[in-house]
Image (cartoon, coloured by chain):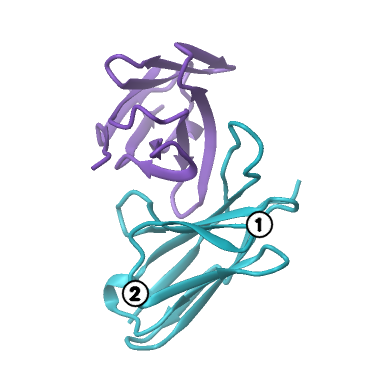
Chain colours: A cyan, B purple
Amino acid sequence: AAGVIQSPRHLIKEKRETATLKCYPIPRHDTVYWYQQGPGQDPQFLISFYEKMQSDKGSIPDRFSAQQFSDYHSELNMSSLELGDSALYFCASSLKEVSGTEAFFGQGTRLTVV
Amino acid sequence: GEDVEQSLFLSVREGDSSVINCTYTDSSSTYLYWYKQEPGAGLQLLTYIFSNMDMKQDQRLTVLLNKKDKHLSLRIADTQTGDSAIYFCAEEDGGSQGNLIFGKGTKLSVKP
């Protein structure tokens, strides 16, 4: 079965550079969520989109922005990267209308800022 | 703010049962979740329980929910070395599906 696909799997950037992470949800899923997991930390919710509109906002820095496109894929744009942005970034998708829906997670993008 | 608490480590012998405990604060969570994360891998949904249920069993996994005490537990029967991973408990933030608040994770080590 198709799962959530994230690209790239690994990314190395220098400080002050920009990074773009992509997420392709499970087909027919209309909601995507972004999470950040620092080394040895629990995942922290960043932001979510439903039907291309932002639906919830968590602890996302102002340097980050995200959007969901008409094909429901989402991109997380990160500018002025800092060393502390090094983390595993997860995307999850779900079908909002389904009660008790599971949020299926992708394998994550490991971002290393040097 | 909302918070989810878990013990950080658990060590068991292969074949024993493992019990991972979690306390949460958001009583508006419709569902509570257990996720498994193997080293360097993504989050795998293990199971979830509807907040009006006391117990849910799924093969080797048993979830117990005490809503009054806001206590959730995950029991793994006949624990295998392949069960070694970090287990995250998660609640829904303000009852919002998919906007999850995770605990710090319990690292389960299974010794042969």
Say few, some or many: other residues with alpha carbon within 10 Å of mark 2 (under 14 / 14 to 19 / 20 or more).
few
Q: Is residue B88 above or below residue A45?
A: above
Evaluate whether residue B22 shows in this view.
Answer: yes
Q: From the top left corner, tell me how far across and down residue A22 is, in percent.
A: 58, 70
Q: From the top left corner, tell me how far across and down residue B90 is, in percent.
A: 40, 36
What SS does tag 1 mark? loop
Indicate the amino acid at tag 1.
Pro
Q: Check the residue under mark 1 and report the chain it is in.
A: A
Number of numbered discs visible in the structure rendering: 2
Q: From the top left corner, tell me how far across and down residue B108 is, in percent.
A: 36, 33
Quarter of the view holding residue B11:
top left
Residue corresponding to mark 1: A25
Q: Is residue A22 left or right of residue A63?
A: right
What SS does tag 2 mark? loop
Q: CA distance from mark 2 to mark 1?
A: 24 Å
Could you confirm whether marks 2 and 1 are on the same chain? yes
The answer to whether mark 2 and mark 1 are in CB contact below 8 A is no
Say few, some or many: other residues with alpha carbon within 10 Å of mark 1 (under 14 / 14 to 19 / 20 or more).
many
Q: From the top left corner, tell me how far across and down residue B8 is, in percent.
A: 25, 36
Q: Is residue A5 left or right of residue B25?
A: right
Q: Is residue B94 above or below residue A108?
A: above
Indicate the amino acid at tag 2.
Asp
Q: Nearer the viewer, residue B77 or A69?
A: A69
Q: Earlier in the sequence, mark 2 or mark 1?
A: 1
Task: Tell me the mark number nearer the camera, choosing from 2 and 1.
Answer: 2
* Residue lying at 34% horizontally and 74% vertically, measured from the top left: A62
Residue corresponding to mark 2: A62
Q: Check the residue under mark 2 and report the chain it is in.
A: A
* Residue lying at 30% horizontally and 21% vertically, measured from the top left: B70
